Image (tube, grey):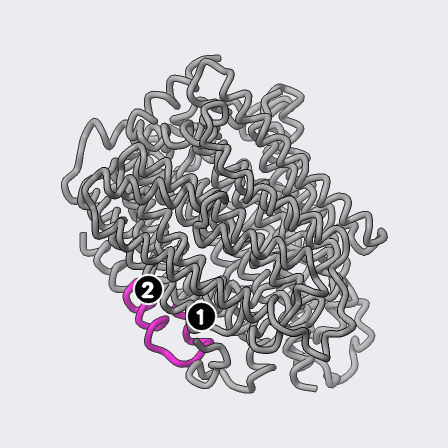
Amino acid sequence: MSLYLLCLTLFCVGLYGVLRKRNIVKIIIGIGIMEYSMNLFFVLLGYRYHGRTPIDAQNQNILNMVDPLPQALVMTSIVIGLAATALLISIAIRIYEKYGTFDITKIKRLKG
Amino acid sequence: MSDNPNTGLPAGKAGMSLIVKTITRLTIGLILLFGIYIVMHGHLSPGGGFAGGVIIALSFIHIMLAFGKDIAAAKISRGLASNLESIGALMFLVIALLGFLGGSFFLNVLAKGRPFKLFSAGTIPLSNIAIGLKVGVGLFAIFLALVILEGAKRK
Amino acid sequence: MNIIPLFVIIPLFSAFFISLTGRLFKKGFIDAISGVSCFLLLALSFYGLNALNHSANQAMVYKVGGWMPPFGICMVLDGLAGFMLITVNLVAFFVCIFSINYMEKYTDKPKFYTLFLLMVTGMNGLIISGDLFNLYVFLEVASIASYALVAFGTEAEELEASFKYAIMGSVASGFIFIGIAFLYGFTSTLNMADMSRILGASPSSWLVPFVSVLFLMGFGLKAALVPFHAWLPDAHPSAPASISAMLSGVLIKALGVYAMVRIFFNIIGISAGYLSALMFLGALSMIVAVILALSQWDLKRLLAYHSISQVGYVFLGIGLGTPLGILGGLFHLFNHSVFKSLLFLNSGAIDYSTGTRDLREMSGLKEKMPVTAGTSLIASMSIAGIPPFNGFFSKLIIIFACIQKGFYGYALAAALGSILTLASFMKVQKYAFLDELKEKYRNIKEVPPAMKFSMVCLAAICVLGGILLLPSFKFFLSGAAGVLLEGKEYAGIVLGAAAKP
């Protein structure tokens, strides 16, 4: 249970970064932290006490295996996170090019 | 990766110091080979297309960090990278479409072979190769694009 | 051969094929590829709904790779999915035709088509997916493509809007992912039908409210319900007009409304408290957004605020939970995707000819652009709910359903929202199309024929939309509403259809 609570704490750290920070790069890092905490949480859901890795090998009995499905899903989620982060960073670079700042309080041409 | 024109000369303007360049030249082939190993053994051991592809991309990114972006871009240009990426995606789709030969999308139609052998598991290794190509080249293309963006900003 | 996986295969193949060969061929070739693939998708969605209507089952299930549903991934085509597929692919087809000329002013058309078709892939995949994680993956494919499309012009405002949108979208996806993780942790399955069965067999008192709140936040952000709407008025106007039409017309509905109602009605099971939350948020969006829209002078921004408001109507209708309310909500969803994409295409046509989006700049365009003015008039009357057009019927059904269930306040709010919408669109018509033609617009021309074609076709659908309520076409809507009404019987229907060979 405490592990799950730590994941929640990490998620809140990321959310704090997204909501509270003024620097664009820090916001992107906040999104990254959120994604990692989610992935960690999902992998932990598949864990069982004293479980072994879910890898089939020659001449071995597989006993007490952890759930392999969350690991595959988290892999997919990491790939999605990679794509989103790459896009965000390239947008951030272009924003710096146009506005000359990373501060979101100064990036406000859209209003209304 | 010995076709660098600066070989043996003092560290040029592009890239890092001589020590880094030498070590990179020694290790880069091994890293690439390890990436290919991971991709090829994706159906037997941990790893697979994505993990192996990332390692392959890292070997090229390593060249870029050590020797500068021009030499890395000479190996794989942006146009080639984006073409290879599309080819990887199309390859994966075609492998999935091969399943229609047996009647269902994504069906594993090839012979499964014996477990724990390299040539086994039907279409799964082929899919891993397609994903490895797509991820390896795609990640490198992302890195190259970001570096070029950054460079364009400085000028 | 079963057609269901083709909804993903065709756009995905064309997307990467265009990205690979786009630079080699002439421009006409890639226009043709994307146009043909969008047309094929539209034809397939009609064929799919027709096949579903004539089959004995209520749902068609496709087992990917031949694996049985609780273990493998499956694709489900039922009444609601067929309805959404037609909506998405109809708009996508006309937007694709419109883009042939409109996107000439942007560079790099192949990249545009790649991203556009990837977005269509994401939406189609999300709609036919029968697996919760697969739904999430397709949702992200569509979202990431749309973030990139919003920034397509790479001007300062577009980048800013895209950044906001991407951050909001990532946070929303995070909430959805955690919700899916909790559901998986509790039920140990990802198949939507199986999950619904297990949740029905062993109810949990804490899980359902908790997950409901997570999904309400996540999908509410994607659908731009009012407390979560701040990104939409920036993001949708900043995109190229054809993409604005896609985003406002179908993306917020496929990603927000469809995914939300599918999960709540068919998997988690609906409760009275949740329905009232949905109705309240819907009514709030309806009123707040339309009031904000009244004071806008940027045409596309005004339309974006109306999107929030009209999605509010959809949620109000669906949130009523009665057969009539759900029917009205879904009908309004279809109508809104038609007239809102038409309005955005009109704004694109005005932008194409005059180069401005500001209502104060334009005047008297009716004289020079009769087709744009006429179609825009039809769409405006449709969105405001003037009788012969489709928007009137759906709003009428929603208001009737409110009165039928005794929610007089909500019925009044819906009528008020409609009046304010009418006021707002009278402003658009007056400033943009009536009055004297300005001197600097003496030489503008009407847009090219491809753009005219899409606008006229969409306008025709607006005029004829009401016939969908006639008994012979009723299956289109009532099939979709039936899926939501069947609720948790979805599990039995899908698993039963999958068990048959």
Looking at the figure, which quarter contains the C terminus of chain A? Answer: bottom left
Measured Cα–Cα span from mark 2 to mark 1 = 31 Å
| Image height of A93 relative to A35, above or below | below
Left or right? Give the position of C224 relative to B42: left
Q: Is residue A40 in view from this perspective?
A: no
The image shows residue C376 at horizontal and vertical percentages of 58, 57
Give the letter of the chain under mark 2: C
Q: Residue at the location (39% across, 67% down)? A: C230
**Measured from the top left, where is residue C452 in percent x and y?**
71, 52
What residue would you read off at disc 2? C288
Relative horizontal placement of residue B110, taking residue C54 as reference (left or right): right
Relative image position of residue C380 (x, y in whole percent): 51, 56
Q: Taking the image as drawn, is residue C437 in sight? A: yes
Residue at the outermost front position: C435
Which is more toward the observer, C23 or C442? Answer: C442
Secondary element at tag 1? helix
Question: Dot 2, how many residues are within 10 Å of its Cα: few (below 14), some (14-19), or many (20+)?
Answer: some
The chain to which mark 1 is attached is A
Q: Mark 1 = which residue?
A: A28
Q: Position of residue B47 (x, y in %)?
A: 52, 46
Viewer-nearest of labels 2 and 1?
2
Amino acid carrying label 2: it is: Val
Up the image or down, C273 lies above or below B107; here it is below
Furthest-left residue in view? C205
The image quarter in which residue C154 lies? bottom right
Q: Where are the magenta residues, as a range?
A: A11-30
Mark 1: few/some/many CA within 10 Å (<14, 14-19, 20+): many
Residue C420, quarter of picture: bottom left
Question: At label 1, which amino acid type do we have?
Answer: Ile
Tag shown at residue A15: none
* The quadrant where residue C371 appears: bottom right
